[in-house]
Image (cartoon, rainbow, N blue to C red):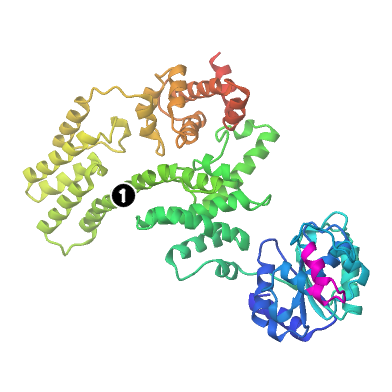
Amino acid sequence: MSVAQVKKALYDFSVHKTGSAIVLKGEWGTGKTFLWNQVIKANRTAFVQPSYSYVSLFGVNSLTDLKISIFENTVPCVKANDVTSKDSIIANLVKLDFSDAMAAARKGLGYTKEAKIPFAGSIAGVVESIQYSMISQTLVCIDDFERRGASLTARDVLGLISNMIEEKKCSVILILNDGSLQKDDEFFTFSEKVFDYEVNYAPTLDEAASIVFDYEDPYYFKVVENSKKLKINNIRLLRKVKYFSDLIRPFVDGKPNEILDAATMLVPLAIYAKYSGSEKSVDIDDLENYKGGFSLHPAEQKDLTPEQKVAEEKKLAKQAFLHGYGYGEADEFTFEIVKLVKNGYADSDSLSPLIDSISVTVAKNRLRQKIISAWHTFHHDITISDEALLLIFETAVRDSGDITSPYEIDGVLEIFIAAGFEERGKTLVDDYFEVIRKSRPITHRREMYKLPQNSYVVQRLDEYFGESNKIWTLAELVEQFHGRPVTGEVLELLSDFTDDEFYDYFKSLSPLKFVSYAESLLFLGSRTGLPASVDYYKIVFIRAFTALLRIHDESPLMALRMNKFMEYRQMYDEKLSVNH
C-alpha cells in the first residue's frame, strides 16, 4: 500500500470504527509510528473516540504495568500528542473520586519528599483498585510490541486488547515490526481472534526519502538518488544519511562537482555498510579495504581449499555489489567519510586539507580535458582554420601543464611542422619540458604508455631523464604507483629496499595512509606478468609482509589490530617456501 492508501486506512479506522482492533505492520525503521502520529495530528478533532492513549511496550514487564501505562497516558483526543505524561497523570488522578487526589498526585510525582500515594500505596494500587474502570471509549495505540518485557506475554497483551474492545468500547491499533517475531510466537495463535485486519506499510524508496529529504535541494537530490541505489527505505537509516550528509556539507559546498558527487555517493554507502544489519552486502571496513577487488588468489583459484573458495565467493559478491553501485576503490577521501560515520563528527584538521588537495587534482583533470578537446577538434572540425587550430593546441598544452604526456607533445609538434611552423612548435615543446622538469611527474621511461618519435622531443626527453640524479625514497616510490598501475622500473626500485626499511616506512605513515598503502603493497603478491627474470612482485610482497608481521608481533593488542592483513599469511608462507 502507498503512503496515501495507508493514511486513508488509518483515518477510516480512527474516525469510523469503534470497538475494533487493527495491526499496523511494516519493516523496522520504515516510519510506522511517525506515519500514525501524522494521522493523529491531522485528524484528532474528527476521531469518534473521545480519548486517546499511546503506550510503548518497551520494558513493560506485566499486565498491571500495561494497564497503568494506558491509564497514565490517556488524554482527550483533541490534545493527542500535545499533553505530557506528567500532565496526563495529574489530570487522570483528578478524575478519581478521592478527596486527596491532588495531594496523591503531588506526592507520587515527586513534588514533596513523600513518594507514596496514601490512599492506595501507588498509582498501580489506584489502577488495580478500580480495575482500570476509568479506561473506556479510548483510541489506544500500543507500540513496540516485540520489545515488551520478558514477563509480559503476547497472550496477556492480546487478552487485554480483546477486553478493551469488547467491554470498554475502545479502538486499539497495534504497531508491529514485520518479521520481528518467531514463527511459533503465540501472537499468531491469538491475533486472528482479536484483530479485524492488518494494514501493511511498505513505503516506496521515493516515499520514504520524501519524509526525510527536501527533493528541491540539489545536494539532497544527489544523496537521495544514491540512497535509492542502495534500496534504503528505512526512515531511521535515511535520517542517519541526512545527519552525516549535513555534517560533510560545509566542507564540500562550493567545491567542484566531482567532490560533491564523491561525498553524496560515499555517505549513503557508509551508512548502509555500518547500520543495515546482518543482511547488508558489505561492511564498513570493506569500504576501506577495497582496491577494485577483494580476490585473495586470483591466479590460483583452482588451488584453493573449500573454505577459501567460500571466502572468495563472498568477496566476489561484495565486489559485484560495489561495482554495481559505482564504487571504484578506497582513497583518502573514503577514509575520511568512513571515519566521519564511525566517529560521528567531521575532523576539519584532516578533511579540509584533503578536500583542498582533491580540488587541485580535479582542476588538473579539467585542464586535461583541454588537450583532449584540442585533439577532438583536430579530427572532427574541418571548418576551423590552420591558425585557429594551432592556437587551440598552444593554449591546451600550456594550460594542461604536466598533465600532458611527452607522446602527446610529439603529436602536437608534428602538427606544427605540417603547418610550416616547426620553430613555433619547438618553442612549445621547450615550454612543456620546463614545466615537467620542475614537477617531475614521470620517474622512468617504462612509466610511459608510448615513447615519442620526433627526434627533437626524444632529445628533450633524454635531457629530462639525464639531468635527474635523484635517489628515490621508499615513500616517494609508493606514492608513484599508489592508485595507479605499478611500472616495472618502480617495482624494481622497490625491491631494493630491505625488510627494516619497509618496517620504518610503515611506522612513518599517517593514519590516513597506513591501511590503504599497506594493502597496495600486499596486493602486489597476487600479481604476475612482468617480462623479467626476477619476480619483483614477489620480492616486494615478501619484504612488505615481513615488516607488517614484525609490527604484528610487537604486542597482543598490536596483533589484534594487524589481523586485517593476516589474510595474506598463506600467500606469504607459500612464496617463502618456494624461495627455500
Residue 293 lies, with reference to residue 242, above or below; the image says above
Magenta span of residues:
92-107
Q: Residue at x 59, y 30 (%)?
A: 561
Question: In the picture, residue 414 is in which quadrant?
Answer: top left
Please provide percent x and percent y for residue 576: 56, 18
Please provide percent x and percent y for residue 493: 36, 23
Nearer to the camera, 499 or 553: 553
Please provide percent x and percent y for residue 175: 76, 68
Residue 178 lies, with reference to residue 557, above or below; the image says below
What's the residue type where badge 1 is placed? Answer: Asn
Q: Secondary structure at mark 1?
A: helix
The answer to whether residue 101 is magenta is yes
What secondary structure is the magenta-colored segment mainly? Answer: helix
Q: Quadrant of the N terminus?
A: bottom right
Question: How many dots with numbers?
Answer: 1
| Residue 462 relative to residue 155: left or right | left
At label 1, counting other C-alpha atoms closer than 10 Å, the crowd grade (few under 14, some 14-19, many 20 or more) is few
| Residue 197 relative to residue 255: left or right | right
Q: Residue at x 85, y 63 (%)?
A: 117
Residue 28 lies, with reference to residue 199, above or below; the image says above
The answer to whether residue 63 is magenta is no
Nearer to the camera, 443 or 426: 443
| Residue 123 relative to residue 454: left or right | right
Residue 115 visible to an observer of this rendering: yes
Q: Which residue is mark 1?
A: 365
Residue 197 visible to an observer of this rendering: no
Please provide percent x and percent y for residue 492: 38, 23
Q: Residue at x 35, y 58 (%)?
A: 254
Residue 340 lies, with reference to residue 138, above or below; the image says above
